[in-house]
Amino acid sequence: MVTEKFLKLKKKILGEVAENFSRAEEISEINTLKILNAMCALKVSDAHFKTSTGYAYGDIGREKLDELFAEIFKAEAALVRTQFVSGTHALATVLFGILRPNDELISVTGEPYDTMQTVIGWKNPARGSLKEFGVNYKEVALQNGKVDLAAIKNSVTTKTKIALIQRSRGYSMRAPLTISDIEKICATVKNVNPNCITFIDNCYGEFVETREPVEVGADIVAGSLIKNIGGGLAPTGGYICGKSELVELSSYRLTAPGMGNELGASLGTPRLLYQGLFLAPHVTAQAVKAAIFAAGIFSSLGYKTSPLPNEPRSDIIQAIELKSADKLIKFCRAVQEFSPVDSFAAPEPAEMPGYADKVIMAAGTFVQGASIELSADAPLREPYTVFLQGGLTFEHAAIAILHAAQAV
Ligand SMILES: *Cc1c(COP(=O)(O)O)cnc(C)c1O
């Protein structure tokens, strides 16, 4: 039960964030129109939703979906597949597809997301990593949580093959990059080395703004279909969009050299991917509103939140510093308890593949682990920051957020 006190608080916060809610709705309208225009122009039809089996040569649904993603991202080509097991897999496919022994990769936005550490293998050694294949790696540290353009200029050389740029904050307190930040970073990199490939980890960023990274100088982007762009309907998968040659190289890593994008059965998923894409701007806006609301509630209770309630957004993540492991666990348990699926489960901190610290995750989701659905997670480390994201409907997110606030 939400108490009278918290119902009052809800009303107060909704008043304070009204303008930011309108902005989220406006962005959703613009992105919906963009997708509708692309679907109409490319003549999406019922025939594209038919399932394919086996090698799936000539699968028109798969080919049309690639075209549609490319159109929406203003990219030359795209590779949208349920054969990607996660966002990390899509990101790794780009890196392994393009990089060759002795090439240099630079992360220009500080330490990459936890699961990328084992892919790269320099900080968190792992079998099969890029390091094992002889790929060199450098990192440009952030300066007070901000991207350091001067340091990027000094670190990128004519030998740098890929500059990795992470749009979202991941499990950190740094602000996510805006599209105009990405524009500046790409320009800085290209200024030193026009041949250096700018590669964006686009996870959690899709449709939070009205433009996507390829429009401002990114050569290639990748992300997960069980975050923003799957609209809550995609059952699994990932995507890659960008320059044709780079997407092609990536496709040889996903399937096999010589095969590329011409195989891959859809096994009943096409309609969900198309329909999820169509819903994605709206669902993303629901998640953005949930994040804004959570920031409002928790900052009014005295917690440090990032972003602040009325700061502009460029991903769907809301970080809240809870300062104690106990509050972190209580918060996650409340989110789980007020979930439509597995509400009876009590999340426990545990080791997770790809993560260095123990992690606690609340995700009572229809699609396992889908973080476009309301979910909360946190590595068990100081200052016990919880990362809340998603929410297919704002109504549901508000109920869970209020109960989490009561619980802590
Ligand atoms: C979610 C995410 C990924 C990929 O994670 P998966 O769980 O493998 O989909 C990569 N980078 C960032 C910043 C992310 O948020």
Image (spheres, grey):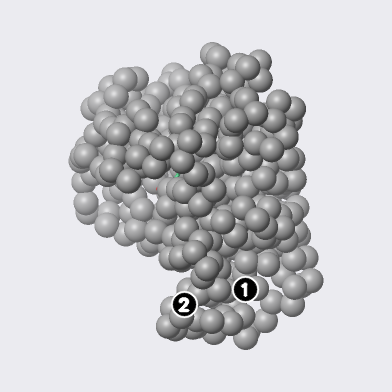
Residue under pointer 1: 63
Judge by depth and name the residue closer to the eye, 15 or 142: 142
49 relative to 85 in the view: left or right: right
Which SS class for mark 2?
loop
Judge by depth and name the residue closer to the eye, 325 or 218: 218
Give the residue furthest to the front: 102
Contact between marks 1 and 2 (CB within 8 A): the answer is no
Judge by depth and name the residue closer to the eye, 93 or 40: 93
19 relative to 53 in the view: left or right: right
53 w.r.t. 185: above or below = below
Mark 1 Cβ and ligand 1 under 8 Å apart: no
Which SS class for mark 1?
helix
Ligand 1 falls in quadrant: top left
Q: Position of residue 240 (x, y in %)?
A: 57, 55
Residue under pointer 2: 265
Q: Residues within 10 Å of mark 2 (few under 14, many from 20)?
A: many
Q: Residue at x 29, y 48 (%)?
A: 337
Task: Locate residue 13: give its quadrant.
Answer: top right
Quarter of the image where the N terminus is located? top left
Q: What residue type is disc 2 on?
A: Ala
Instruction: Mark yes or no: residue 405 visible.
Output: no
Task: Locate residue 22: give its quadrant.
Answer: top right
Query: Counting residues from the N terminus, which is met first, the one under dot 1 or under dot 2?
Result: 1
Instruction: Mark yes or no: residue 40 visible.
Output: yes
Q: Residues within 10 Å of mark 1 (few under 14, many from 20)?
A: some
Q: Position of residue 131 (x, y in %)?
A: 38, 36
Q: Position of residue 177 (x, y in %)?
A: 61, 32
Quarter of the image where the C terminus is located? top left
